Amino acid sequence: MEELTRKRSFIAADFQPTSFEVVKPYYQALLNVEWPTMDQHFAFAGWLANRSELESCLDEHQAWLYVALSCDTENKDKRKAYEFYIQEIYPKIAPLDDALNRKMLSYPLLDSYREPGFDRLVRSVQNALDLYREENIPLQTELKGLESQYAAKTGSLCIVYDGQEYTLPQAQKFLKSHDRSQREVVYHLIMEARAGISEKLQALMDRMLELRHQVALNAGFADYRDYRFRELQRFEYGIEECLSFHRLVREYMVPLKEHLDRNQAQINGLDRLRPWDLKALPAGLKPLKPFEGASDLIQKSVAAFNQLNPYFGNCLATMERMGRFDLESRKGKAPGGYNYPMMESGAPFVFMNSTGSMEDLETMMHEGGHAVHSFLVHPLRLNAYRQTPSETAELASMSMELLSMKAYDHFFEQEEDLHRACLEQIQRAVGVLPWIACIDAFQHWLYTHPGHSRSERHEAWQSLIQEYNSAVVDWSGLEEWMDYAWQGQLHLFEMPFYYIEYGFAQIGALGVWRNSAKDESNALTAYRDALTLGNTVSIKEVYHTAGVPFDPDNSYLQALTSWTLNQMQSHENHLHRS
């Protein structure tokens, strides 16, 4: 793979943005540029490139601070370094970014400048100008600090079972046990651990809601939902499309999830399904073990990606050589998983909490899809073109989860395990959609009811759970613990309203996968072509290039649901015959 790190021509080679004083001169140099009377487009293109170089450098610096902290949330020096940037540098940069936006739009020949994606950049810059309020800078700075607290409060959660300490990701393995009493005990321990910090997370959410609402009011919006939709640049769809998605999920996916839950109860011989039974394995089956440790996971993932496309495998191999993985769960590590793009050096960083489970394989394929996407957009000229919308980014990752099933033989030697793994993957792909819709609907409620009480929040959440949760699962006696469930969704704290993208993308990914079953070569080519577009075209055009609709109608979704159910039944039939 060619040299990835973008060569600097505007920023000094040894520049490190460790203080505002060393950053400010570069902003000032960009602001002091006077548009020439001749060769204006050439000069303007250079100015855009220089600004992009500065943004890439700053983005990557902040990325590494975040990575360092999430890998070790209990390290005071790493927290101090991250908080210094967020509290001391970011607030001073924000007004200068606003000034650069105004400078860009003052270019006298703006309307005649042409390059792919530039119209979207202009729209984005104008949107940023419309939203910018100086009085919001301290509020947004406080919010960034609060968002980092979520990882600190949840990253150290552990349980003690049978005399041994386990992180919450590590404890998940017991929920697959054949021993129902063991599952129940561990489930209660996990929920007790979450309950222990529930009050702190409630208080954290209280303050976040207050600050976010004030940010919206300052910018002239009635509530934070309207503000956030604009901030996320949801120009191609809006609130009504989200509500329509909720309806489609209730109509098609909740019944499918209930079908899965009835099967789960049946294969385990249970009269009623309790929350600790959802991942239980039937007697005689052991949990799938697709890999042994982080190194094995990386090597097998490289081989699987190579089978799909050698370029995909090379992306992961390059990341391994550059030390861009932190995969195994440990105490003090932030929860969850992510792929963090590195806008200057090119190769992203993949973070996860692996314990050797099938769910970890899914996470690796997901983040690996993001990683491939990061490589594919890196050659685009401007940083803004490489900042892909979430709907596009998640199409990359969720499609890879399903496409990679074809290469599961690198993780499983037995045919029975292959079918089990594929079945579990498909079940998770469709089973998560009601939860996505529920979380998104909850956010709509949270931010359109400013000043609500905690009891009102509780009632709203319980109402939504009843609407989207499977009626097959018996929660009797556990209603209080159900109220903590939303607190495990980090997006609510760290990335408000960023979650429905997974829903749109999951449906798109199912379509990409269905296309690959018909013509794998063309489907993979279309998938890769779509990812190279970055943020230079509309979301709908990206999906169209990938061969799927962004806004499927009822008939498409009905056909897709039916096909997916047939795929699950095919794997089930193989397992019944074995």
Image (cartoon, grey):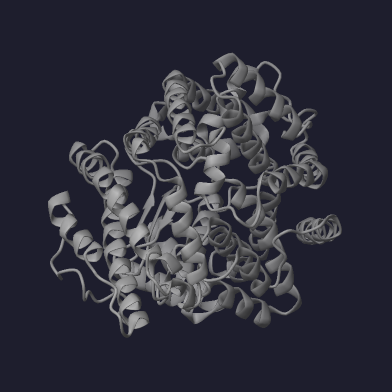
Residue 292, percent from left and from top: 43, 57
Relative side of 8 to 383, left or right = left
Q: Nearer the viewer, residue 528 or 168?
A: 528
Q: Position of residue 575 (x, y in %)?
A: 75, 57
Q: Residue furthest front?
A: 37
Q: Residue at x 70, y 29 (%)?
A: 464
- Residue 195 in the image: state x and y as whole percent: 49, 20
| Rendered-image quadrant of the N terminus | bottom left
Q: Nearer the viewer, residue 501 or 331?
A: 501
Horizontal arrangement in the rendering, residue 121 relative to residue 264 (left or right): left
Please report the residue visible at 59 percent of the width from the left and 34 percent of the height from the top.
Answer: 443
From the viewer's perspective, is residue 351 above or below residue 41?
A: above
Q: Residue at x 76, y 60 (%)?
A: 571
How many marks overall?
Answer: 0
Q: Quadrant of the C terminus?
A: bottom right
Q: Is residue 291 visible?
A: no
Name the image quarter holding residue 399.
bottom right
Q: Nearer the viewer, residue 327 or 418?
A: 327
The spot of residue 235 in percent (x, y) is 60, 55
Say whether residue 256 is visible.
Answer: yes
The residue closer to the viewer here, 11 or 471, is 11
Residue 63, by quadrant, is bottom left
Which quadrant would residue 551 be assigned to in this image? Answer: bottom right
